[in-house]
Image (cartoon, rainbow, N blue to C red):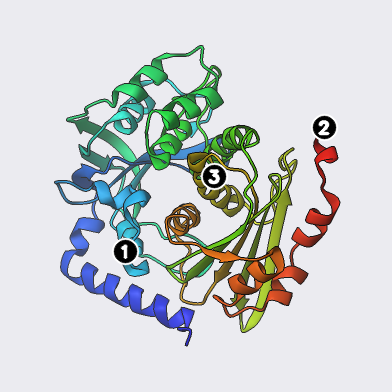
Amino acid sequence: MFSDSQEIRRSILAKWHETLSKHGNLFSSDSISGTSPPSVFVGSYNYPKVFVGPMVPPVHGDTSILDNPERWKEKSLEDIVNFRLNLVRGIQKISVDKTEGRYIENLQEVVMSSKPIDSDLIFEKSTSSHISLDGESAPFGPTGIIHSAKFSGTTSEKSIEKTFYDKDMKAQDAVLNLYNSGIEISKIQKCFSIGMLGQKRKLVPTKWSITATDDIISKSLVDEILDYSIIDSCKIFSYEHLGNVFVIVLFPHRWIYEMIEAWYSNGILGFGSDYEDARGIDHPPAIAGAYFAAKLGVLEYLAKNKIQSGVVILREIRPEYAIPVGVWQVREGVREAMKQKSILADNFDDAILLASNKMSISKSEWLTNGNILKLIHQKTLSDFF
């Protein structure tokens, strides 16, 4: 039985107000002292002059989990929303071309740090602890315009520091260099966002940098797997978290990929999808950043196992996913699915049936609202040469 989205939001908001009744003075003040996870945010509103700044909770200690999606696998939606709400956002309006100067350079040191950083922010006026939660936008904690900011205790991550000072390296090469050095994707995205990578550096709104990072890494992985042998059987992987059900079908075919999403809105089922072949996708996908996040998750599996296949990812977004928390949960959900034991199927038709049996949406509905059958029938090896 699905839960009601509005009821979930009301419950989480009520508990947040309970926290504020005890500690509200920490979230509504003209200053804050705490330990940044470390974390920074670059907005997109009013581009190319955007709001930029650190995110700091009103507590000291090891706060790293507050902005580290790779560690949120077992956390509930309420846990993750609270991580977000507990981070107070300090902002200044900065031109995206301004990647130097004391303020931005301090933020770059924050991002470069290998551990949480003690931070003291003074705002122009008190922040407001008023928060609203809806089903459309990600949750954010209080926001304040920064008058002054001080950071201490930074310890640079050596591979990030080296990449930062290499101003001859292209941005996409810098992303891949950090990824291949074992730096977490969420950390690479922050480096990209705060203007630390590439030859012609700019600040990049956080939500854009997330998609760009996923896309750059995915393209590199596609290039890698095209040299591998094609799998000889159909495999189905699945995982469920935060009201999202992910089912991934691998089938014998040169690389083609489709992601189909289904969601419920006022009791009506909606769908969205997009797809590509070995030439990639040449337009912004209809399902936005989720497309690249999911693609990266499955490509890591193919590259690790040195195999190539066709891929269909089905994502059912249930009402329990009452508050969107970001496309990181798509990437981590698919990554986790690929760690599970797979189910084998005799053919593609049976594989899609087994996949749909794990969700509340029928096989015919998935196929009708996607393009994978047409894609399979159209593509032969001659299409790629």
Q: Who is closer to the viewer here, 139 or 171? A: 171
* Mark in front: 2 vs 1: 2
User: Disc 2 marks which amino acid?
Assistant: Phe
**Left or right: 159 with respect to 310?**
left
Q: Is label 1 in a helix, a strand or a loop? A: loop
Question: What number is the disc on residue 75?
Answer: 1
Q: Tell me where residue 263 sits by quadrant.
A: bottom right
First in sequence: mark 2 or mark 1?
1
The answer to whether the residues at label 1 and label 3 have Cβ atoms under 8 Å apart is: no
Task: Tell me where residue 12 appears, x and y as whole percent.
Answer: 34, 74
Q: Is label 3 in a helix, a strand or a loop? A: helix
320, above or below 382, in the image: below
Task: Tell me where residue 66 appears, x and y as whole percent.
Answer: 29, 52
Task: Tell me where residue 113 appears, x and y as whole percent.
Answer: 27, 31
* Quarter of the figure with the C terminus: top right
Q: Which residue is mark 3?
A: 302
Mark 2–mark 1 Cα distance, whole angstroms, equals 46 Å
Q: Tell me where residue 140 sits by quadrant.
A: bottom left
318, above or below 136, in the image: below
Q: Which residue is mark 2?
A: 385
Instruction: Name which residue lies at 51% across and 11% down.
Output: 168
User: Disc 1 marks which amino acid?
Assistant: Lys
* Mark in front: 1 vs 3: 3
**10 Å crowding of disc 3: few (<14), some (14-19), many (20+):** many
Instruction: Name which residue lies at 27% across and 34% down.
Output: 148
Direction top: furthest residue: 168
User: Disc 3 marks which amino acid?
Assistant: Leu
Instruction: Name which residue lies at 48% across and 24% down.
Output: 174
Task: Tell me where residue 153 appears, x and y as whole percent.
Answer: 17, 30
**10 Å crowding of disc 1: few (<14), some (14-19), many (20+):** few
First in sequence: mark 3 or mark 2?
3
Q: Who is closer to the viewer here, 202 or 262? A: 262
